[in-house]
Image (cartoon, rainbow, N blue to C red):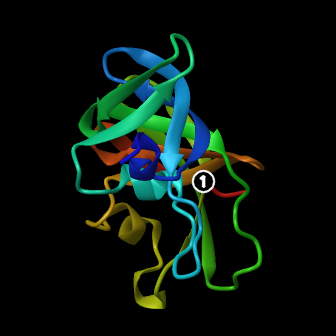
Amino acid sequence: MSGKSLKIVKNEQPVRLWVHPEGAVVGTLFLRPQDADDQAESPADVLNTEQPFLVLRRTKPDEIRFYNRNAIVRVEYEETPPTDDEMVRTMQCVIHMMDGSVIDGRINESLPPEHARLYDYLNQGKNRFLKLFTSSNEACLVNKSYVIQVTTQTD
């Protein structure tokens, strides 16, 4: 049996992780590509799994590392926010982090009408990371454990 038959096909997504206490780490996450039955995996899918570690290919030095999700403060990567779904609610906010950083952005999420407030999104128990867009083409996943406070922002 060859080693190639054991290889799992993955797409690589360039990211910048902010890891406690290491700081900024540049590399790529491995994401499952889209298949006939499922949509492609996103960085948010990878970060919000139950498993304690994720795989990152570092850029400099070129190596594979396994990072504990609990130590990841935030993850930044390129993504365009959804615009065509009428169920998507946009909420402007400012997130104040334990490391002193302040992240200004907007959350674009499809939420049920009875739980469509920013407070409801922040308190969803299923996800460890909040997703917000900090520009027209940059997403940021923020570890809830490192958030001190979130304030609403109006245009």
Instruction: Please report the residue visible at 38 percent of the width from the left and 33 percent of the height from the top.
Output: 73
Instruction: Please report the residue visible at 35 percent of the width from the left and 33 percent of the height from the top.
Output: 72
In the image, residue 47 sits, relative to residue 54, either above or below, namely below
- Name the residue beneath numbered marker 1: 153
Instruction: Please report the residue visible at 55 percent of the width from the left and 44 percent of the height from the top.
Output: 140
Quadrant for the C terminus, please: bottom right
Q: Position of residue 19 (x, y in %)?
A: 37, 25
Q: Position of residue 41 (x, y in %)?
A: 51, 61
Residue 146 is drawn in which quadrant?
top left
In the image, residue 155 sits, relative to residue 68, either above or below, namely below
Q: Is residue 16 visible?
A: yes
Please name the amino acid that badge 1 sits on.
Gln
The total of numbered circles placed on residues is 1
| Towards the viewer: 64 or 146 | 64
Q: Is residue 152 visible?
A: no
Q: Is residue 72 left or right of residue 39?
A: left
